[in-house]
Image (cartoon, grey):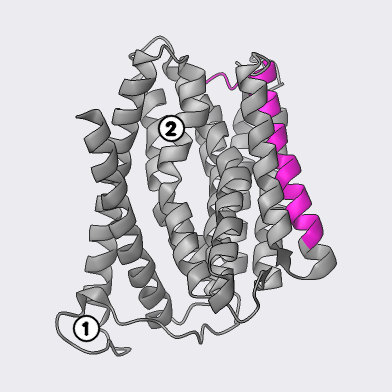
Amino acid sequence: MEILMLIISLIVILIAAELFVNGIEWLGKLLKLSEGAVGSVLAAVGTALPETLIPIIALLSGQAADSEEIGIGAILGAPLMLSTLTMFVTGCAVIAFKHKRKHKDKVIVHYDTVSRDLKFFIFAFIIALLCGFIPTEFHNIKIAIACLLFISYFIYILKIVKENNENESDVPNLYFAFGHNEITQSNKAIIPVLVQIIIALALIIIGADVFVDSVSYVANLLNIPAFVLAIIITPIATELPEKFNSVIWISREKDTLALGNITGAMMFQASILPAIGILLTDWSLTSSGTFLSALIAIISATLLYGELRTKKHMTVKMLLTCGIFYLLFLILVFAGIIR
């Protein structure tokens, strides 16, 4: 039964991702936003909802003895998963659709958008990581850092919204157009777009929740520790929307949307989620596990940023290299170094 629910939840998330991608592209078109804003803000924040809710619920409930451990693990696990495994999956998608892509295995993105995402992510996540080594008695300093992280994300949003590069890419017909061949840029047009996005998000959250519950059940049977569950299994499940969205956009050669969806979510999860974690917990990251998992995410993102700065585009080789960092992380986990 649990395996059947896993399969059903995956199908639900996949269908929901297609609906969400289609709806979010139309919303960006109707609001005349750049591809960078659509991918890094609208799509990123929307698909980040499942992995955002899990640590918040875990921390606020506080019912389980390891709820704080699960919350912090989920907060740190999401950026790690995005900067390593999700990038690897995107690289695999580039190879899979290489024959139909104009630029083949080159990932052509809007340089300012994606480089800014990575730069902001590295800055915010390093700040959040260092905050974890501040003694708990300096609580006011930690609160100030949490406020800094909130402000940094607000500044990041302002910079993206001010972009003036037009989104001129073709958008497939809206699924919820209800018989109309196309949606025009009018006030009434936004209603079916919003309805489709809301339904898609609801399906994503429900599908991810069912997936996490099923995986958690299996993990408990196998006696997997709470921290490992939080930092490995849960993020894999909750990052599925980003993975599916990026694969869809890569197949349509909308690389800025594909990468922006990932890097925008990374920025959200390196600033807003740690800020919430700092406010709701002692935010002590002195264990080797928490430090190494965050460090791996920062190194992977730094290499991506370095290649983008040098070549003005990303290569499939670098995206696949990110998978090596995830493999390294797994080795450290199962070797008992990260626990």
The residue carrying mark 2 is: 234
Tally of numbered discs: 2
Q: Quadrant of the N terminus?
A: top left
- For the residue marked with disc 1, what is the amino acid? Lys
The one nearer the camera, 17 or 1, is: 1
Q: Is residue 111 above or below residue 237?
A: below
Residue 279 in magenta stretch: no
| Label located before the other in sequence (2 or 1) | 1
Residue 339 locus on image (x, y percent)? 60, 15
Residue 270 locus on image (x, y percent)? 60, 43
Rendered image quadrant of residue 119: bottom right
User: Which mark is drawn over residue 92?
Assistant: none
Which residue lies at the image location 70% right of the left edge and 18% below the top edge?
288
Whether label 2 touches label 1, CB < 8 Å: no
Which residue lies at the image location 67% right of the left edge and 51% below the top edge?
320
Is there any visible trace of residue 54 in the rendered image?
A: yes
The one nearer the camera, 63 or 176, is: 176
The one nearer the camera, 3 or 275, is: 3
Secondary structure state at the residue bearing disc 2: helix
Alpha-carbon neighbours of circle 1 within 10 Å: few (<14), some, or many (≥20)? few
- For the residue marked with disc 2, what is the amino acid? Thr
Q: Is residue 121 left or right of residue 26?
A: right
Magenta segment, principal secondary structure? helix
The one nearer the camera, 92 or 165, is: 92
The stretch of residues the image draws in magenta is 280-307
The residue carrying mark 1 is: 188
Which residue lies at the image location 40% right of the left edge and 14% below the top edge?
222
Rendered image quadrant of residue 53: top left
Residue 17 locus on image (x, y percent)? 35, 59
Alpha-carbon neighbours of circle 2 within 10 Å: few (<14), some, or many (≥20)? many
The residues tagged by marks 2 and 1 sit, at their Cα atoms, a distance apart of 39 Å
